[in-house]
């Protein structure tokens, strides 16, 4: 019985870590959107802000359904990444390509985090299904961002 409890607590902890990273991504996209002058990129980033907010709500629901406590706030790494993005955008005069590359770096990091978490969560759980769906949407966002870099690198 105690193994199941530890397992549930470990899953809740994994989900809280993913939740914190969703907060980081939401804040990062929000700040990047403010720095962008291109209206279509700004709109896309604002869509990703909403998406990551929805991800957070879905993960919160999973944590609550498992009887866990939802932790709030982002991570130190996320705060440092946003500070780097702020610094970089200030010296590159809000260079869209540079901001896209930083977003790509963040999305690659998110994919690694999701993959790590999914290795510890039973594939039969609804939490696993939630993470798979979110991971797939992150992959889609990453592909979209990667396709845009050459367009803005040339500008």
Image (cartoon, rainbow, N blue to C red):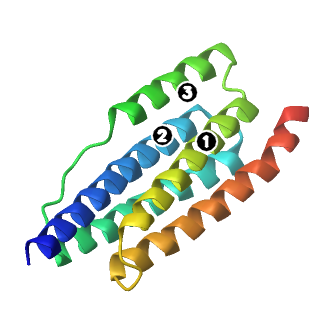
User: What separation in Å lies between label 2 and label 3 (alpha carbons)?
Assistant: 8 Å
Q: Residues within 10 Å of mark 1 (few under 14, many from 20)?
A: many
Q: In this figure, which residue is indicated by the disc labeled 2?
A: 28
In which quadrant of the rendered view does residue 122 lie? bottom left
Residue 82 on image: x %, y %: 47, 30
Dot label at residue 87: none
Report the residue at 30% width, 58% height from top. Answer: 14
Report the residue at 55% width, 27% height from top. Answer: 85
Query: Are the residues tagged 2 and 3 within 8 Å (C-beta)?
Result: yes
Q: Say if residue 12 shows up in the picture.
A: yes
Left or right of 57, for residue 146: right
Quadrant location, the C terminus: top right
Residue 75 on image: x %, y %: 33, 38
Dot label at residue 85: 3
Q: Nearer the viewer, residue 38 or 130?
A: 130
In which quadrant of the rendered view does residue 19 lie? bottom left
Dot label at residue 103: 1
Q: Nearer the viewer, residue 153 or 59?
A: 59
Q: Nearer the viewer, residue 146 or 118?
A: 118
- Residue 45 vertical position relative to residue 99 in the rendered view, above or below: below
- Residue 131 vertical position relative to residue 86 in the rendered view, above or below: below
In which quadrant of the rendered view does residue 152 lie? top right
């Amino acid at each position: 019985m105690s193994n199941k409890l530890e397992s549930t607590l470990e899953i809740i902890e994994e989900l809280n870590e993913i939740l914190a990273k969703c907060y980081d991504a939401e804040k990062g996209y929000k700040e990047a959107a403010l720095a962008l002058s291109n209206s279509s990129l700004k709109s896309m980033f604002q869509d990703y802000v909403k998406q990551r907010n929805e991800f957070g709500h879905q993960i919160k629901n999973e944590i609550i359904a498992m009887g866990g406590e939802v932790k709030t706030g982002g991570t130190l790494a996320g705060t440092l990444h946003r500070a780097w993005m702020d610094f970089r955008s200030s010296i590159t005069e809000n260079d869209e390509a540079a901001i896209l590359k930083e977003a790509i770096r963040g999305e690659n990091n998110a994919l690694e985090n999701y993959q790590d978490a999914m290795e510890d969560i039973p594939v039969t759980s609804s939490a696993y299904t939630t993470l798979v769906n979110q991971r797939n949407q992150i992959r889609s966002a990453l592909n979209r961002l990667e396709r845009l870099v050459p367009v803005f690198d040339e500008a």
